Every structure is written in C-alpha cells, then in structure tokens.
C-alpha cells in the first residue's frame, strides 16, 4: 500500500460526514493561486458528493494579514457551529484556532507550511511537514495536498474526467507556488497540463480565447498563471476564485481581461521597486543579506521583488512594506539556506513569521527593524 499523508483519511471521512449531515462548511484559503485552486477543487469534490459549501473566504494579505485573522472570525462568527477548513494557511495560527474553537467552529487545517512552535489545537491537521508525519515527499504545494484529500474523499469511483479537471488546477497552483517540479509535483504538472490544452473550464477557455490569436498554449500559460496568482482579495472575496468557479462565459471573459491588465500593471510596479532596491544596495555590498523596505511598496509585491533580487544577487532577500508602527515583508532565500531557521533565531524581535526554508514572511515592530537585521546578518555570516 502506498503511504498517505498523516490524517488525510481522517479529514476525508470527517468532510464526508459533514456533507451527509448537512453541516455548514466554510473554506478559508490563502489568496494566492495555490490557496485558491485548493479551495476550488475541494469545493468541487464536496459538490460531487452531493454537498455544498456555505462560503469561501480569502483574507487580504495587505490589509488583514496572512492566515486566519480576527476580522474574518468576527465576520464568520454567526455561522458557528460549522466545519471550518483552512487551505494553504492555518498551521501558524495557534491563538486564532483557539478562538475559533471557542466560537463553536470545528477546525480542519490543510497546509503545507512548516509548523513553528507547536501546532494549533485543530480537530484535524493535514500537513506533511508535521514532525511526526513520515510521508516521504515534503515538496507538495498546498493544492497537491488538497488533491490527495479530494482523491481520498471520492475514492475509486471518481471519473477520469473529474480527476483530470482537478489535475488541471492542481498543476496551475503547483507551478504558481514554485515548489520543486520533481516526483509527485512533476506527475501532477505533466498530467494537468496535458488536460489543460483541451480544458472545459470556462475560466481557462476565456484566457485562451483572449491570449489565443494563434499563439501556442505554452506561451499563454505563464500569463494565465501570473494573472490568476496576482488577484487581490477584497472583503474576503477573490476575483480569481470568482473566475475559476464561474460558468458564465461572458463574465469569465470580463474577469480574465481585468486580471490580465492588472497583472501587467503589477509587473511594471515590481520592476520599479527592483530598480529602487538595486540603487540602495549598490552602496552596501559587504552585507550578508539584502534588507530593504519602504512605506510606498505594496506588500503583495514584496514576494515577487524578493524572488528576483534573491536570484540575481544570491543572497537572502528581506523586502518589506513599512507601515506606521509595524512592517510586514516577504523573504526569499538561496538554496542551502533556511529563512525560517534564521527567523527562529531572531524571533525575539518579531511579532510573527512563517513559511518555507526558501520563501517566507514576517511582521515586526518598526523599532526592532535594525536589531532584526543585525541578528540576521550574524546568522547568515555563520553559515
Ligand atoms: Mn502555498
């Protein structure tokens, strides 16, 4: 028997039971394509079992912060009791899960991020990065974990068509999340892209129609992924989610067009910030890390900027938006170094942090920025 991710059978059974008992189900996903595609395929799996979800919620990273947040819980409190399923976030939300429990929610966490100091008191946690999970492949995107969960829920009876349509979104989310394209991820991407070329999904068809004009699929693909990945959440709604779940061709075309335009604008803003960072670091070449922030930089652009800077200069890149009292940022690290370990060492200066070895995020009081930077420089000097 092939090995399964810890608790995945338990989670599948619990969700199926909720469908049977007509319990309320809330899906709470991260606002990037990995999180959104996770929500979409889990919703489709629940529908396939004859159930439905009560609502899908996506926090706005810029204004509400990453993960489960108090504003969301406050908006959702009237829906308790309900099954509250988090996707691509939640493993770091120890306090928030306590609060959700108190409000009468039963929380299931589906995540692929590294647990920090302990795990939340959720009813079920599916995350192969838990220390006692011996699942051999740790590189799945969250949508890869969710795909495994959907397969577990639907079992052998699943039709090849439905499986393919799940694989399409799983491939997109996996590519978008920039996890290593090896082992299961490679299989998912190969099968998903093969199916995508002839997809029935109205959202993808809309993109292909707009970008089409005789262009090959491979050229359109990065644009589609980038557009879907850069939609922002507003009032816990997300345009990419609306697009991917719409069956109205006209609406799909309108949203797809909007997302492509917004993404183009975003790419230009990313370029501008990169230029500014490069101007600043040209005077600081002796430092171990790149550590730059600004009040005018959008938080959602910090990740893309840090990626480019990290690749180009082969140094850990900490890029942040400086707000009134706090700063919030994204981190990208060269292979062989671990940003989560680095921040663990310097955790005294941080409000929160979390993520993966190569890609993570943090929140900090402005008065601690210099001490944090000094601590990071010492950590990476030792490496
Ligand atoms: Mn992810």
Image: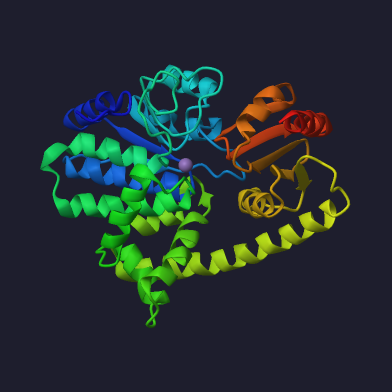
The residue furthest left is 157
- Position above or below: 106 against 41: above
- Position above or below: 139 against 192: above
- Residue 133 in sight here: yes
Image position of 227 (left or right of 150): right
Image position of 375 (left or right of 80): right
The residue furthest bottom is 213
- Residue 254 in sight here: no
Q: Quadrant of residue 63?
A: top right
Residue under the point 54% across and 30% down = 70
Measuring from the top left, give residue 282's x and y in whole percent. 85, 55
Which quadrant, please, contains the N terminus?
Answer: top left
Residue under the point 38% across and 48% down = 37
Which of 62 and 317 lies nearest the eye of the viewer? 317
Measuring from the top left, give residue 305's x and y in whole percent. 66, 53
| Color theme of the render | rainbow
Measuring from the top left, give residue 377's x and y in whole percent. 78, 33
Measuring from the top left, give residue 167's x and y in whole percent. 29, 51
- Position above or below: 80 against 32: above
Residue under the point 82% across and 41% down = 287
Which quadrant, please, contains the C terminus?
Answer: top right
Q: Quadrant of residue 243?
A: bottom left
Image position of 202 (left or right of 112): left
Could you tell me how many numbered marks the image carries?
Answer: 0
Which of 133 and 245 lies nearest the eye of the viewer? 133
């Amino acid at each position: 028997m092939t090995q399964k991710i810890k608790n995945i059978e338990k989670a599948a059974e619990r969700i199926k039971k909720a469908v049977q008992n007509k319990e309320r189900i809330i899906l709470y996903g991260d606002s990037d394509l990995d999180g959104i595609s996770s929500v979409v395929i889990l919703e489709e799996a629940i529908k396939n079992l004859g159930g439905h979800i009560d609502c899908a919620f996506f926090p706005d990273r810029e204004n509400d912060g990453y993960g489960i947040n108090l504003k969301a819980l406050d908006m959702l409190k009237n829906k308790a009791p309900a099954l509250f399923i988090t996707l691509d976030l939640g493993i770091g939300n120890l306090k928030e899960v306590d609060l959700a429990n108190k409000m009468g929610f039963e929380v299931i966490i589906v995540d692929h991020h590294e647990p920090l100091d302990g795990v939340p008191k959720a009813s079920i946690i599916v995350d192969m990065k838990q220390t006692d999970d011996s699942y051999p492949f740790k590189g799945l995107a969250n949508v890869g974990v969710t795909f495994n969960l959907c397969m577990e829920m639907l079992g052998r009876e699943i039709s090849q068509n439905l499986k393919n349509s799940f694989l399409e979104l799983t491939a997109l989310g996996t590519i978008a999340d920039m996890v290593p394209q090896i082992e299961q991820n490679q299989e998912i991407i190969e099968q998903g892209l093969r199916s995508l070329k002839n997809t029935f999904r109205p959202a993808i068809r809309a993109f292909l129609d707009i970008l089409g004009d005789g262009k090959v699929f491979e050229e359109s693909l990065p644009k589609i992924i980038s557009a879907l990945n850069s939609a922002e959440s507003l009032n816990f709604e997300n345009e990419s989610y609306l697009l991917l779940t719409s069956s109205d061709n006209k609406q799909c075309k309108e949203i797809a067009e909007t997302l492509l335009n917004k993404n183009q604008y975003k790419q230009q803003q990313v370029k501008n910030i990169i230029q500014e960072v490069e101007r600043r670091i040209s005077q600081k070449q002796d430092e171990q890390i790149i550590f730059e922030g600004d009040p005018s930089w959008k938080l959602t652009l910090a990740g893309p900027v840090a990626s480019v800077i990290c690749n180009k200069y082969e140094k850990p890149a900490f890029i942040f938006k400086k707000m009134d009292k706090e700063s919030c940022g994204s981190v990208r690290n060269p292979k062989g170094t671990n940003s989560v370990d680095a921040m663990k060492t310097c955790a005294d200066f941080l409000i929160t942090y979390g993520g993966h070895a190569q890609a993570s995020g943090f929140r900090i009081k402005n008065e601690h920025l210099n001490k944090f930077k000094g601590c990071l420089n010492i950590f990476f000097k030792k490496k």
